[in-house]
Image: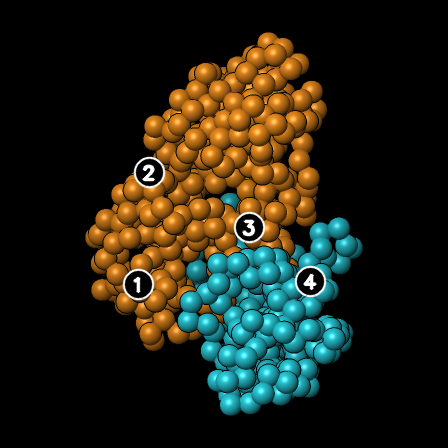
Amino acid sequence: MSIEVISPGMLTTVQDLGRYGYGPLGVSPAGAADPVALRFGNRSVGNPLNAAALEMTLLGGAFTFPEGTVVALTGAEFDASIPLWTPVHLDPGATVKVGGSKTGARCYLCVRGGIQAPRFLGSASTHILTGLGGRHIRRGDKLQIEANAISDPIQLSRPDYLRKNLRVTRGPQNFGEDALLTFCSSTYIVTDDSNRMGLRLQGPAIEAPHGGQMISEGVSLGAIQIPSGGQPIILFVDQQTTGGYPKLANVITADLPSVGQLRPRDEIQFELIDARTARRLLRERTLP
Amino acid sequence: MRFIEASDQSLLVEFEGGISLETHHQVVRLLRALEAHAFAGVRNLHPAYCSILVVFDPLITEPEQLEDQIRAIDIEHAALPAPRTVEIPVHYDGPDLSDVAAYHGITPQRVAEMHSSAIYTVYFLGFVPGFAYMGGLPEAIATPRRESPRKQVPAGSVGIAGTQTGVYPFATPGGWQLIGRTTLDMFRPDRPEMNLLSIGDQVRFIPA
């Protein structure tokens, strides 16, 4: 069982739910930028939730399935030759074409059985900067499909989880209440200089304490760091594992999939909540 | 030890004392103890100069519970593994070598002699897989980072920044002053021990 890549799209990589536990080696988790979409897609084609799929960015590709199979396309609203958020049976030789995104940044093409790609530290996720794990999809690639399906395809109801108003908790450095107030009462714009390592924002500058000087420490996914110049950066899935810029706040875990759907020129706001509430929101969300 | 909630899924455990060998030993002891205990819900550990970021699954554990578990560890008596010594051959021909020499008013050869005369300690790995932050650079050649980072630093480049030194394992952006290069692979996923250097190692650079 295989897939032929007719066109790869703008940036298409293999991703699963990422690799955890290798921080002491400097290895970041990587994994799907919108893990909710990946989980729904995998579940609807009968895969384990962690099966590897194709993550497309802003402009999708075209893929032919010589033997046919069942696929599901989930994530942001992309123009596509198949409907989103539903399992689709493909006849042998069928081609799935994915165009541009109408809202959001990324979609996932989940294939029944899962996509085969080199595993690094237990995960087929692609770390783009180092090329470790997974696969960066090119025109003419031929991908193999694994046989890891565990259940029948199923129609799930489409989840409603994406936000432009991101909830954050306080970061580990103390910036003072004025900085947090500025940050949470302003609109920030996602700049073109944003990728899976981090999203650079543009808006009212934030002043870092002690002139921004601090000793490097471990950084969490979704940390909002303030470099010199005061324009915030949201650290994301391909992040470096440690960093020396102070961190004002951190996007809550329940809203991280929304970060994966932000695209350049999106306008976003932030709302401060406490960590206990953030964990309650995570427990209350519905996932397959 | 100080505990700070860095996010809803991470707890920063911080030691007092700034960047020092003593603090580093505390970090290594706690890291090894955390790896040995494998507390339920701990997903990742990010050690650094004087802290460890403990990433956890909030559906399995809570920061209060982790704090209690970590406080109960007898860190002072936890094992400190004997350090290995690793030698790294270096060609001292980096693009910033003459700038570094000029900054200190010495010859490039003297920079190389001083860099290769010290014994360094790997404080932690971070930034990208296999990048070892090493302390122990002689003050006489300590140099600030470049004013603007390079977009691409070749893999194997040996750099200095402040009183740190390090070797870039991959071609990545980087702002350190590049004084040389090594042909050793700092990180190879097809090797049993992928990273050449580990936290706590002693390192010597040998002029090649």
Residue drawn at the location 58% of the way across and 18% of the way down: A64
Q: Amino acid at mark 3?
A: Leu
Question: Are the residues at dot 4 and dot 2 in contact (C-beta closer than 8 Å)?
Answer: no
Discs 4 and 1 share one subunit: no
User: SS at mark 3?
Assistant: loop
Disc 3: which residue: A129
Q: Amino acid at mark 1?
A: Gly
Question: Are the residues at dot 1 and dot 2 in contact (C-beta closer than 8 Å)?
Answer: no
Q: Chain of mark 2?
A: A
Q: CA distance from mark 3 to mark 2?
A: 28 Å
Nearest to the eye among marks 4 and 1: give it.
Answer: 4
Discs 4 and 2 share one subunit: no
Shown in cyan, the chain is B
User: SS at mark 2?
Assistant: loop
Disc 1: which residue: A230
Disc 2: which residue: A163
Shown in orange, the chain is A
Q: Chain of mark 4?
A: B
Q: CA distance from mark 4 to mark 2?
A: 41 Å
Q: Nearer the viewer, residue A217 or A139?
A: A139
Q: CA distance from mark 1 to mark 3?
A: 25 Å
On screen, A172 above or below A120?
below
Nearest to the eye among marks 4 and 2: give it.
Answer: 4
Q: Amino acid at mark 4?
A: Met
What label does residue B186 carry, if any? 4
Residue A75: x and y, percent?
44, 30
Q: CA distance from mark 3 to mark 4?
A: 16 Å
> Can residue A142 be seen?
yes
- Disc 1: CA contacts within 10 A as few (<14), some (14-19) or many (>=20): some
